[in-house]
Image (tube, helix red, strand yellow):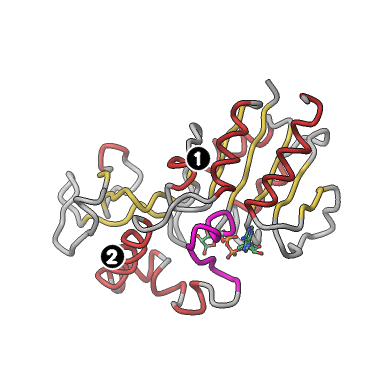
Amino acid sequence: MKKVVILSGAGMSAESGISTFRDSGGLWEQYRVEDVASIEGYLRNPSLVIDFYNQRRRQLLTVEPCRGHYLVAELERHFDVTVVTQNIDNLHERAGSSKVIHLHGELMKATSTAHPNDPSQLVTLDAQHIDIHMGDKASDGSQLRPFIVWFGEPVPEIERAAEEVAEADIFVIIGTSLNVYPAAGLIQYTSPSAPVYLIDPKEVPWNSFHRFHHIRKGASEGMEELMRILTKDEA
Ligand code: APR
């Protein structure tokens, strides 16, 4: 089976009703990134940040995967698929994708403030345990925090993601403005023989990189078109 690696961003979940970050009306027009999505912001005002993610977690319970998520999962019938997502939602998993690498963490998990990347500290959150409160402790005794990779923190999964991209026969980018590194740099790991497909309704700034096939559509319609392209030989 050919190996397909998909890099998804906030645009993947836009049609599920979760706002993107940098489109008009996006999350970074309502909040300052440095206040709610940086390690400095968390250390400065942990309760503000904990509450910001409690709100986003509550919203996640009210939305569903979009058709695009389901089509990404359906690709697994034809290819060996790895999803590398910048999204902290669990919509790829809920749509049935079986191999998902979360570069920026997971909204439905919590961890230790002192040892955030120690797997033994992870706590799974769910509808019965949806909020984190000041005073909640991880097993190492430090304040429980969202299992999110904030600006200013390391991205532990980037090495694994880069290895996946380097082995991809086909690379697909869906719904990311490619503004944030190291995620945006994954494109540089593709082999010269791997076609690159971009699904995004808008142009994406790209420093002199022109060999991608741009499907200028939203995630769901774009994935419909990509499925036709990638499975036409099987018809
Ligand atoms: N379908 C597909 N793509 C879409 C759709 C849609 N319906 N709507 C918008 N887009 C595209 C936009 O054109 C844009 O290119 O999705 C992209 C969203 O870009 P951003 O809002 O910058 O989101 P993303 O690239 O995922 O941000 C990366 O920044 O703040 C951090 O950690 C946060 O993971 C996030 C990272």
- Residue for badge 1: 101
Residue 12 located within the stretch drawn in magenta: yes
The relative height of residue 85 versus residue 51 in the rendered view (above or below) is: above
Instruction: Look at 46% across and 47% down and name the residue there.
Output: 91
Would residue 231 be found to the left or right of residue 122 on screen? right
Classify mark 2: helix, strand or loop: helix
Residue pointed to by mark 2 = 50
Q: Quadrant of residue 45?
A: bottom left
Image quadrant holding the N terminus, namely: top right
* Residue farthest to the top, as pictured: 1
Picture coordinates of residue 125 (x, y %)?
26, 48
- Of residue 79 and residue 221, the one placed in the foreground of this image is 221
Marks 1 and 2 sit apart, C-alpha to C-alpha, by 23 Å
Q: Secondary structure at mark 1?
A: strand
Q: Quadrant of residue 165?
A: top right
Instruction: Classify mark 1 as within 8 Å of ligand 1 or not, answering yes or no.
Output: no
Q: Amino acid at mark 2?
A: Ile
Left or right: 136, with 201 as reference point: left
Say which quarter of the image contains residue 162: top right
Figure quarter occupied by ligand 1: bottom right
Instruction: Please state the extent of the stretch shown in magenta in the rendering.
Output: 11-23
